[in-house]
Image: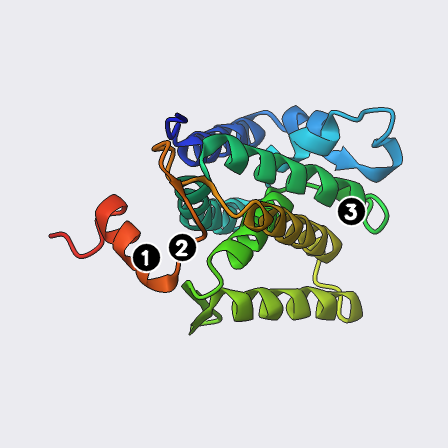
Amino acid sequence: MEQNRHYTLWLTGVIAAVFALQTFFPAVTANFQLVSAYAWSRPWTLLTSIFLHANVAHILFNGLGLMIFGSILEQIIGSKRFLAVFFTAGLLSSIASTFFYNAVVGASGAIFGVMGALTVLQPTLTVWVYYIPMPMYVAAFVWAISDLFGFIVPTGIANAGHLAGLATGLAAGFMMRGMKRFTAGGSGKRMSILTAEEFDKWEKENMGKGKT
């Protein structure tokens, strides 16, 4: 029986702590960011760069995304599988980014992996994208199109990393869905992929939805 370890909270806390170190010690960024030209001579930066962020807006956006989507996915598939999705997506996102950008920092690729997995496992989950509510599977399509558009009009965002992370998460989601059954919520109870109604019931019981 796997106990939920709340790794989403731990990861968010570590990312916040690392950003504080970046603020006071610029050498942290210099030594641990992913510089494509040195990626294979300093392979650890493929992972350490995930915990670095460029500015306050960058870390707030990623932190919010990780807390929202990460907490839901971790509850559904368990802490160990959540970590596997997060770090695998982050690693493959970093590798993909080395072919397109000189240097990269940020957890976006890993978080897109989380969102990709959630898209497959909970496709009807409603999320807000650009202030518009839509099901998760539509949101994933919108995110993908937005990142593809970023190749046409560069925005300074690692769009290739986003797409690589999203693709990794989608693949992981389909792998888990193909297993038919997995541990949900770390409770040890075996259950199939949740329907929208079952997810609403689970959310009320585990996330405090509707409680005062």
Does dot 1 land on a helix, a strand or a loop? Answer: helix
Q: Position of residue 61 (x, y in %)?
A: 49, 51
Amino acid type of the residue tagged 3 in the rendering? Ser
Mark 3 or mark 1, which has the lower sequence index? 3
Instruction: Say which element carries label 3.
Output: helix
Q: Which is nearer the N-term, disc 3 or disc 2?
A: 3
State the residue at coordinates (50%, 54%): 121
Identify whether 156 is placed above or below 67: below
Residue 36 relative to residue 64: left or right: right
Q: Is residue 30 left or right of residue 86?
A: right
Q: Residue at x 53, y 29 (%)?
A: 18
- Mark 1 — residue? 198
Q: Quadrant of residue 151?
A: bottom right
Q: Position of residue 160 (x, y in %)?
A: 75, 55
Question: x and y percent of residue 155 in the render?
Answer: 70, 63
The foreground one among 3 and 28 is 3
Q: Secondary structure under badge 2?
A: loop
**Rendered residue at 75%/35% (across/down):** 34
68 or 116: which is nearer to us? 116
Say which residue label 3 marks: 97
Tag 2–tag 1 contact (CB < 8 Å): yes
Classed neighbour count for the residue bearing mark 1: other residues with Cα under 10 Å, few (<14), some (14–19), many (≥20): few
Image quadrant assignment for residue 154:
bottom right
Q: Nearer the viewer, residue 164 or 63?
A: 164
Foreground: disc 3 or disc 2:
2
Q: Residue furthest left?
A: 212
Q: Which residue is mark 2?
A: 194
Q: Is residue 54 visible?
A: no
- Name the amino acid, label 2: Leu
CA separation in Å, label 2 and label 1: 6 Å
Give percent across and percent down for residue 149.
72, 71
